[in-house]
Amino acid sequence: MGKVVSLIFIALSFGVVRAMAQDPVKVDPKHYKVEVDNNQVRVLRIKYGPLEKSVMHAQPFGIVVFLTDARISFHLRGGQSEVREGKAGTAEMTPEEIHLPENLSDKPFEGILIESKGIEWPYAELKDDPLTVDPKHYLSESDVLQNVSEDTFVRILHIKYGPHEKSVMHSHPDAVAVFLTDAHFKFALKNGKSETRDGKAGDVQFTPAETHLPENLGNETAEVILVELKTKPSPKP
């Protein structure tokens, strides 16, 4: 019971952080645009021109997917600053903090920020986990830890299919898909039906939990970062 209460406190603290500083979408719409907003995540597209910078704003715990290489200086409250770097096609955890980002590169930066709204919840292990049944196409980017505990809020998968390659039947929880390349897939579903689904490089899609068998219908390699959610929506105030 104590653990659940502490997790609820962590989730509610995200709202406190936002109350302490402005939402970047409101105070800096030039650089931040909402792509997805539901009861589990808010997904922002971030775009900075060369050497551009933002204004001070709040950010909760989240995941950033780098669509380009990045070298960003984060100016923090109290006068401190940190330089953080990222490589295109990778993803990593972003801390809960108030900051002012500045692009130190002479090239544009673009990324996808997935802000968590949920709290950790008992997460049933998948019997048909793609990491186990199809390690050729699914690689764990990382298990993202909240603070120093073993409580994971998300799992990041790097998905890569060669031309016309297909998987085996497997399952995913609710997730956010970020397309690193153009993709044209056919999904054979558990109920016997099939669907074709497309994405362009840089696209973002929220994908509900599903059991399926994907097949790359394209003539080029398809790559996707999939951020699987291990959370339940936070209780409403």
Image: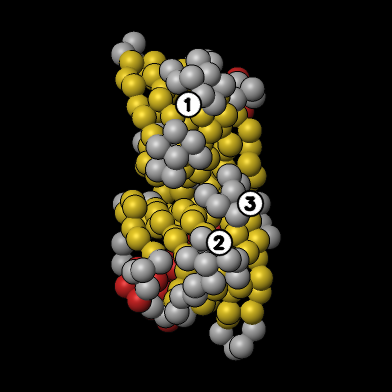
- Give the mark nearer the N terminus: 3 vs 2: 3
Question: According to the image, label 3 marks what residue?
Answer: 87
Q: Residue furthest bottom?
A: 78
Judge the density around disc 1: few (<14), some (14-19), many (≥20) Cα neighbours within 10 Å: some
Q: Work out whether mark 2 precedes mark 1 in sequence or the reverse, and give the earlier one.
A: 2
- Residue lying at the far front of the rendered structure: 106
Residue 172 at least partly seen:
yes
| Earlier residue among tags 1 and 3 | 3
Q: Which residue is mark 2?
A: 107
Q: Identify the residue at image location x=44%, y=33%.
A: 182
Q: Which residue is mark 1?
A: 171
Q: Nearer the viewer, mark 2 or mark 1?
A: 2
Q: Give residue 101's position: percent from left, percent from top.
A: 53, 73
Q: Nearer the viewer, mark 3 or mark 2?
A: 2
Cα distance in 3D space between marks 3 and 2 = 13 Å
Q: Which element is circle 1 on?
A: strand
> Residue drawn 47% across and 65% down?
48
